[in-house]
Amino acid sequence: MEVEKLKNLLEKVKSGEIEVSDALKSLRTLPFEDLGFSKIDHHRQLRTGFPEVIFCEGKTDEHVKKISESIINAGHPLLATRATPSMYEGVKELHPEARYNELGRTISVKQTTSDGKEGVLIVSAGTSDLPVAEEAAETAFMLGCPPERLYDVGVAGLHRLIGNHEKLLNAKVIIVVAGMEGALPSVIGGLVDTPVIAVPTSVGYGASFGGLAALLGMLNSCASGVTVVNIDNGFGAGYSASLINKLS
């Protein structure tokens, strides 16, 4: 349950607009709802500011649909990552305004009218890194931080990056997504005074070892202020960047 909706419910109880028993029915799924195959943590938004997110890999279409239904019915915004088009079709039956980012493989239902706080910039080294970058972008958007995008500005052509230096300087936090040797976060980290979250991707030829080369390169960055998330973890980067941006 969202904080504002909970406050509104308590105000109605206080004013006598609704009975205590009716309020208890609204709260019956706190702190979690047991679906048998899954226990939905409806209390998470009150604790952390954002509800449970569905990681769809390993789940059936029906699992994703039922979990989504529970989250939507509780009044929460919905974010599902690593989702397939068939999973999206199931969620769309529940909520016609559900969005599917085909590139980022995310399903989302916003259920809020707030404009959010700008300040997150997402940078990708190459076009092949866009699926991870878009997962980060959708995550930041759903957490109330609509991001700006700067794509295909890798180290093989640094003039493309330098030509957008103003965007780098205006950002409050920068997510840098790169595969291959993973050099771009170090370059950007040496140009800005804001936090840089590096995301290694599994893009690259054999010796990239599925993103391990990029991960190690980023972990060994000589630039200050660069932190690193797991390989292909656009969600983790988008989530962390949003928390940082809200504190800025």
Image (cartoon, rainbow, N blue to C red):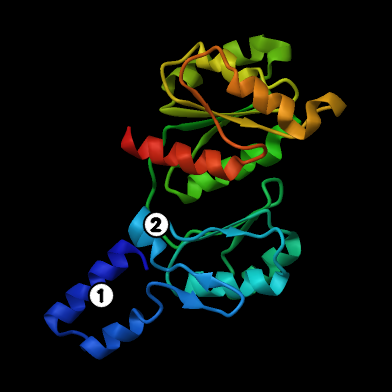
The image's mark for residue 183 is none
| Upstream in sequence: badge 1 or badge 2 | 1
163, 206: nearer the viewer? 206
Figure check: 35 above or below 216: below
146, 46: nearer the viewer? 46
Determine the residue located farthest toward the right in the rendered image.
Answer: 206
Question: Label 1: few (<14), some or many (≥20) within 10 Å?
Answer: some
Figure check: 213 above or below 138: above
Q: Position of residue 151 (x, y in %)?
A: 64, 28
**Quarter of the image with the C terminus in it:** top left
Determine the residue located farthest toward the left in the rendered image.
Answer: 15
Residue identified by numbered label 2: 113
- Left or right: residue 113 compared with residue 142: left
101, 34: nearer the viewer? 34
Q: Position of residue 176 (x, y in %)?
A: 58, 27
Secondary structure of residue under mark 2: loop
**Quarter of the image with the N terminus in it:** bottom left
Dot 1 amino acid type: Leu
State the residue at coordinates (49%, 44%). Answer: 239
Residue 20 showing in the rendered view: yes
Figure check: 83 above or below 124: below
Q: Position of residue 91 (x, y in %)?
A: 63, 69
- Left or right: residue 27 compared with residue 76: left
Q: Position of residue 110 (x, y in %)?
A: 48, 59
Dot 2 amino acid type: Thr
Quarter of the image holding residue 9?
bottom left
State the residue at coordinates (80%, 28%). Answer: 204
Residue identified by numbered label 1: 9
State the residue at coordinates (65%, 9%). Answer: 159
